[in-house]
Amino acid sequence: DERGKGLSTLGGDVVNGQTDLAKELVIPAIPVDSNTKMPAILRIGNPGASDADISAQLISKDGNFVPVGLNAAKVSAGRAANIDIPITQPSNYFGLQISSSEPIVASVYNKSKVGGSNDFVWSTAADQLQRGKWAVSGLSGKLIVAGDNIDVYLDAIFKSGETKRIHLTGSDLKTWQLPSDLKVIEVRAAAKNNFAAILISDKSGSGVVPLIQGSTLTRSSLPSANISVLNP
């Protein structure tokens, strides 16, 4: 997504996909730029045939609460809607738990400033955290885990070949700063309903990468030969 107005650029970001439509979604990492003083925008798409009743809870280190306007929102069938999220918490990131009466897609858009230039970030939902490996070499930022009962074991694999076991526990949101020489994160185990994303932040801008499995192994039967295909 790249935006501009006249000859001025308004920034750009890669929009990560959502695995599937769902009634319950968690966006574990949404960055906050205190310089913009603008609300974040929750964008919800409802492709179904029935209206969707929406409620959302903001997750932060300072406590969980339902922002004004997100306790009883409605998105018409076959339509998309934008809902403002007022930014009041002092932290520079938060998460969002969304509940819907119908399967939906959702993401959060917010503006930022990078070196005095305009930019923006799209934050998308993550799947429940599962075992897997993610290459993070060259990324600067934080791993953020959201959940009522956070319990995650991961291996931090460094460029030197050293491996360090990390155990993250807590509730609501838990963060871990990525070391500068980190090469790979390997999740060994995670509690149920734990969701994670990497919040990238450096002088060139911000971004959010949800920890979603890039591929899933599947099993299929061997094909059987049928001569009638060639000789009907």
Image (tube, helix red, strand yellow):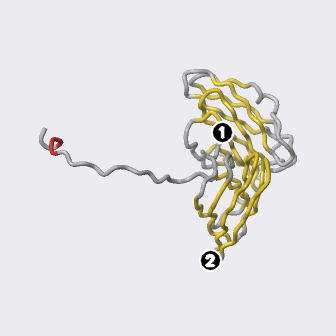
Choose top left, top right, bottom left or bottom right for residue 179: bottom right
Residue under pointer 2: 161
Q: Give residue 76's position: percent from left, percent from top.
A: 62, 22
- Image quarter where the C terminus lies is top left
Q: CA distance from mark 2 to mark 1?
A: 36 Å
Q: Position of residue 161 (x, y in %)?
A: 62, 77
Residue identified by numbered label 1: 25
Number of residues whose C-alpha sits closer than 10 Å to that of mark 1, classed few (under 14), some (14–19) or many (20 or more): many
For the residue carrying disc 2, how many other residues have a C-alpha within 10 Å: few (<14), some (14-19), or many (20+)?
few
Asked if residue 176 is positioned above or below residue 52 in the image, the reply reads below
Could you tell me which residue is drawn at 72 percent across and 39 percent down?
97
For this rendering, which residue is in front, 138 or 224?
A: 224
**Picture layout, residue 186 above or below residue 34:** below
Residue 148, picture quadrant? top right
Q: Quadrant of residue 162?
A: bottom right
Please state which of residues 206 and 66 is positioned toward the viewer in this rendering: 66
Name the residue type under label 2.
Gly
Residue drawn 57% across the image and 36% down it? 21
126 horizontally vs 33: left or right: left
At mark 1, the secondary structure is strand
Q: Amino acid at mark 1?
A: Leu
Whichever of labels 2 and 1 marks the residue nearer the N terminus, that label is 1
